[in-house]
Amino acid sequence: MTKAAYLLTIFFSNYLYAQEFNISTIPDSLMANANVIKRYEETILEIKSPGKYISHERHVYTILNGKADDYADYKTFYDRFTTIDYLSGKLYNAKGKELKHVKKADMADYGDIDGYTMINDIRYRVCNFSNRSYPYTVDFEEDDTNDGVLSFPGWIPVQTVDMAVQYSKYVIIAPKDYEVRYKQLNFAIEPVVIQKGDAKIYTWEIKNIHARIPEILAPREQEIDARMLVAPSDFEAEGYKGNMSTWENYGKFIYLLTKGRDVLPEETKQKVHALTDKLTGDREKINVLYDFLQKNTHYISIQLGIGGWQPLNAEFVSTKKYGDCKALSNYMISLLKEAGITAKYVEIRGEENSLPIITDFPEFQFNHVICCVPMQKDTVWLECTSASLPAGYLSGFTSNRWGLLSDATGGKLVHTPKYDFNENVQARKITATVSDEGNLSADVETQYKAMEQDRLEGLINNYSNDRISEYLKRKIDLPTYYIQNFHYTEYKKDKIPYIKESIQLTASNYAQITGKRLFINPNILTKSNIKLPLNEVRMYDVELYDEYTNVDTVSIKIPDGYVVESVFQNVKIQSEFGTYTITVKVTADSILYVRKEVNFSGRFPASDYANLVQYYEQVYKADHKQLVYAKRE
């Protein structure tokens, strides 16, 4: 620990040791709705230079029940930039008596290898405390030296909705002329700033934060709980220098990392020209080269030092036939450049329903790289880690969010396309027959488009038929059924792909027969099971992420000898959350049922939650309506 960090820790020690770790010292008000209490936390960040900082962390949690046992596990990472100087963990019982104490040498040490990473220099130490008697307390402390600065640790006092916070603080010690950059979210406490010699010390404190009552469909913690982003201004790692004060400057650094890494082997250049020289349109050339990339490379992650930010060069990828998202995107840009097409390198956050980046705070907020090709009338987006997506389609993994485009002029934020309910479409046609015994046999033809096909696209391109069969068994909501056959056909010529699914199935006792009556629900495969709790008091806005259209057209032939006795009315529901319609037509021996549901995304005020509950309740009831037939006398 540095001298400054040590002095600050001693300064705050009276608060820590006065309360001890006895459960009785926790205020009763903090126990409400909590599974874990953050008793004490400190993060001390001392910036030594643009290329070096040291840090001290201490985290003390009282775990009240088994729902919070994850906090008894401590996992810390290190690599060629980060050295763990000190590490310890302590376990206490409910009365604050120490039960166990471990140091760094006692903690298991592993390489951070997953199924996609070929090699990296990331390792981690892990400590696992558990205690069968609740409550118990864990105390973890760590000091690190970081030679190579690309980012700083942020501050997240409240980590989960079921956590209460007794005390948390964050301290920055920086040279007095260093530009300290931070972004406070959801709290307005100003730091206490003092100057001591040539250093400025910034201190934030938070006390007595209560656990929240979880609310379904609430905004994510990033938009509710107090947290702070901290980022470098000038920084340096492995000889590369940059400035992160603006997105433009940040982009100049990324461009520096990629500059000169686009040189292709002569053989690959010739291949590019053989594929594209006779083509007249840029879009056609993009499609051909993207197909070449997909057929001749595969994704493997290699993360070594600055290589976590810098792509492998194009020659390496061309020769070895693999690379990570950075390397494959850089390779695609190089292929396009050889064909006379300018493409751009875009950092982005890849994840379904990803947390939005903070656009007014330049910082390393990304975990993925894609490629984009600006054209006169459009921009073509390319996900270079996929071996199966069509050129121009991003999927839910990177669509509808901000990314950072970097080139020689610097960086600028760009927004990827959003796929809405006009594109995310599931259109299903079912032709079915009900037997005298109430059994159902059905031919099901479904078209999944855009994000509605994403999960299925991954399955059929990466897994066996047995795995797909397991998926169908979980997906289909019928009591007893058997899938006789299934088949998929992909259509990728347009930038919005779709998949056609053909299924033949049978379902025993689908229609209920009671005496002389036959009860049948014409909604065979798209029943809503959403039933939301009606809260007496709603604190937070309602956040709906999914936007889609589902259309089912169902034709059912009923058995001979029955006449219709009861038909439900057509349904039409319109709301700010979506629209829903049902039409049903009954003839002498058949049913024609059409269901259409359009779901809107968006944020709605808390006062609208009751209307959302009512909307889903109406949809649920309509989806479970039955027709009644009587046996002809």
Image: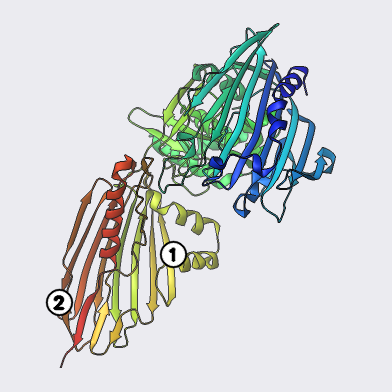
Residue of label 2: 587
Location of residue 299 with respect to 523 vertically, above or below: above
Residue of label 1: 475
Mark yes or no: residue 545 visible: yes
Local secondary structure at mark 1: helix
User: Looking at the image, how many numbered discs can be counted on the residues?
Assistant: 2
Q: Quadrant of residue 542?
A: top left
Residue 358 placed where, x, y %?
A: 47, 28
Residue at figure coordinates x 29%, y 59% from the top left: 617
Residue type at mark 1? Answer: Lys
Which quadrant is the N terminus positioned in?
A: top right
How far is disc 1 from disc 2 in space, using C-alphas?
Answer: 31 Å
Residue type at mark 2? Answer: Thr
Residue 225 placed where, x, y %?
A: 49, 34
Location of residue 238 with respect to 136 vertically, above or below: above
Q: Quadrant of residue 178?
A: top right
- In this orientation, which residue lies closer to the viewer: 161 or 151? 161
Q: Residues within 10 Å of mark 2 (few under 14, many from 20)?
A: few
Local secondary structure at mark 2: loop
37 relative position to 105: left or right: left
Location of residue 613 with respect to 277 vertically, above or below: below
- In this orientation, which residue lies closer to the viewer: 143 or 59? 59
Residue at figure coordinates x 46%, y 26% from the top left: 342
